Image (cartoon, grey):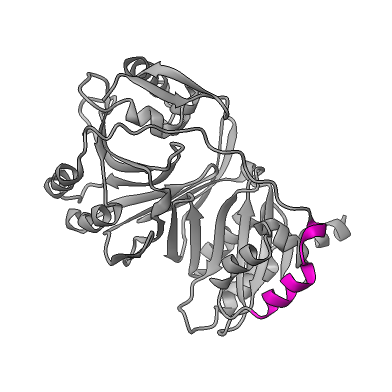
Amino acid sequence: MSDVLMTNNADPNGMRLQTAPAIREQFAAVRATGKRAKDAAEALGLSEGAAIAAHAGEHEYPLKAVPLQGSWLQLLQSLQACGPLMALTRNEGVVHEKTGIYTNISATGPVGLALGEDIDLRLFFAQWHAGFAVTEAASDPARAPQRSLQFFNAHGRAVHKAFVREATDLAALDAVVQRFAQPSAGYVFGAAPLAEVPRPDTEIDAAGLREAWAAMQDTHEFFGLTKKFAVERQQGFRLVEGQFAWRLAKESVATLLQGAAASGLPIMVFVSSGGCIQIHTGPVNNIKPLDTPGAQWINVLDPGFNLHLRTDMVASVWLVEKPTADGVVTSVEAFDPAGELMAMFFGARKPGKPELQGWRDLAARLPRLQELAHAA
């Protein structure tokens, strides 16, 4: 691998030349201050993928990376032999962590599924550009290094990660790394494109959208509906507002989690990185708010499932109803200031079964903005 990298600049339209040794030195210094890897990379004007790529090859810095090459499907399938791993999928405002075994993984073309008891994923392999086996030495020499497999899109954004747990079979993991290692991969990352600007509401066939929405028989039809009418997700909600979608107060996410924990109601929590959707199905119990310098969080801290959601990044929350052959399916969807979907919440249900009445009742109790305005 060349020691000269073309890396993301803080300017989304620009690139700059940086040497791998310089990146390693600066990255180690920033990590030593306690910043997580993504934040350390961004502090250097890099994507996380570019920072990790700079750590390939022989060097003496704490983080070391071995480039991997797919097929990504076969790599994930091979993880079953490793036993329990912690699957992590995140976006800018949410981190979703599930511990379990990677099982029942398949794909049709570039779209894959992992349907394990605990690891439940929707995989969009067209977004998977690079992979690395990462080992990072702990600051305390008595602690074992942190080991993980990390996958990134073409812009250096993490699409999925798998971390070693205490019960992981390390010999099996070593075999996976050896099988898929490709030291000469030489991954390069480009700047992310600017977000698409939605068409004006006046150019959308709102009546047609409402009619097609009312005719849905499955929640999965919604994606096709947005494509057919060339409508952005929240824009679609606005255009059916009062019939199929309602604005909620920003604190509704915390209220939802606390309500589900208090009642024992099983829920589904979806978080997407763009290249992977990770799903938790079941109850949530230990709900902890946390304020840190510059950020406010609501956390689920349960055995086998952790969720970390930045409540200070929640710009809007919607209650959404989608007709299906099994009855109405209700979701609560949170968005960040850039309009990116942070997380979706549903009541736990199986295909062919109506959603739980307890979930409908919980969702109906969440404060709606219109009602808050009237109360004021």
Tell me what residue is drawn at x 20 percent, y 51 percent: 167
- Residue drawn at 55 percent across, 84 percent down: 326
Q: How many marks?
A: 0
Report whether 279 appears left or right of 184.
Answer: right
Q: Is residue 147 above or below residue 207?
A: above
Spot occupied by residue 161 in the image (x, y as percentages of width and height): 35, 46
Q: Which segment did they paint magenta? A: 201-215
Q: Is residue 229 left or right of residue 281?
A: right
To which quarter of the image does residue 369 belong? Answer: bottom right
Query: Foreground: 228 or 23?
Result: 228
Of the pair 136 and 300, the residue shown nearer to us = 136
Please tell me which residue is depicted at 50% across the width and 67% down the height of the picture.
267
> Image height check: is 83 above or below 336?
below
Q: Does residue 367 show up? A: no
Above-or-below relation of 250 to 68: below
Q: Most prominent secondary structure in the magenta stretch?
A: helix
Q: Quadrant of the N terminus?
A: top left
Residue 142's image quarter? top left
Residue at image position (82%, 58%) is 202
Quarter where residue 109 is shown: bottom left
Residue 209 sits inside the magenta stretch: yes
Q: Is residue 97 magenta?
A: no
Q: Position of residue 149 (x, y in %)?
A: 29, 43
Residue 53 locus on image (x, y percent):
33, 30
- Residue 58 visible in rendering: yes
- Where's residue 335, x and y in %? 63, 51
Is residue 190 toward the left or the right of residue 245 in the image? left
Q: Quadrant of the C terminus?
A: bottom right
